[in-house]
Image (cartoon, rainbow, N blue to C red):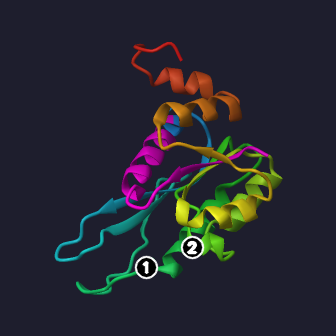
Amino acid sequence: MKVAAILYEMGEGLATDILLTDIAHQLRDAGLKLAGAVQYNSSAPRRSQCEMTLEDLATGRRTKASEDRGPLARGCRLDAGALEDIVGLAVASLNPDTQLVVINRFGKQEAEGHGFRPMIESAVLLDVPVLTAVNRAHLESWRAFVAEEPILLAPVQTEIERWCRAAIPGATAALRQTCCGCCSN
């Protein structure tokens, strides 16, 4: 099973989203067939939390995934209905030709059996590698879901690219194609 998660700490979520999005776009732009979704975060005027948008990697379609709950709202602002819409779109693009599934996060929804969890299961059944991110707060749920010792990656681009090269046929050439030539990996 080729499943890896970028392990990040509380407060590192935004940086991890950017890192995962950059790597997914690099691979997609080099011609690899991806499925799944990445997350964009934008500041919301007069709000303590950012707005979340999910991009379906197969189609490029972006869907707002956060609810505006007011300036004093705390806690989860995820729009579960919007999440399920983007999951449906992403799952529809998954097939045996998919080279990598990227899931923005294995979070609370996935830990409870919802969100992108069915897509991860489908990818494993198709033997398609999966790359996601998991906050340390959800690590035990991730371990239980994977049902074996999980591959955990540091939120470091070179480490993630190394895993991609090993897990995805054709990734070495794809990652080199977009490199400026300054490195030998």
Residue at image x 42%, y 58%? Answer: 13
Residue at image x 46%, y 79%? Answer: 79
Is 25 above or below relative to 10? Answer: above
Q: Quadrant of residue 141?
A: bottom right
Q: Position of residue 48 (x, y in %)?
A: 25, 74
122 left or right, relative to 51: right
> Counting other residues with Cα less than 10 Å from the Cα at mark 2, is it few (<14), some (14-19), or many (20 or more)?
some
Q: Decide which of 148, 157 is in the foreground and name it.
A: 148
Residue at image x 80%, y 59%? Answer: 147
Is 29 above or below relative to 111? Answer: above
Q: Bounds of the magenta span?
A: 1-26
| Residue bearing the label numbered 1 | 76
Residue furthest to the right in view is 125
108 left or right, relative to 96: left
Q: Is residue 5 magenta?
A: yes
Distance (Cα) linking label 1 and label 2: 10 Å
Q: Secondary structure at mark 2?
A: helix
Image quarter (top left, top right, bottom left or bottom right) of the C terminus: top right
Residue at image x 43%, y 53%? Answer: 17
| Residue bearing the label numbered 2 | 108
> Counting other residues with Cα less than 10 Å from the Cα at mark 1, is it few (<14), some (14-19), or many (20 or more)?
few
Q: Name the amino acid, label 1.
A: Cys
Q: Position of residue 11 (x, y in %)?
A: 37, 60
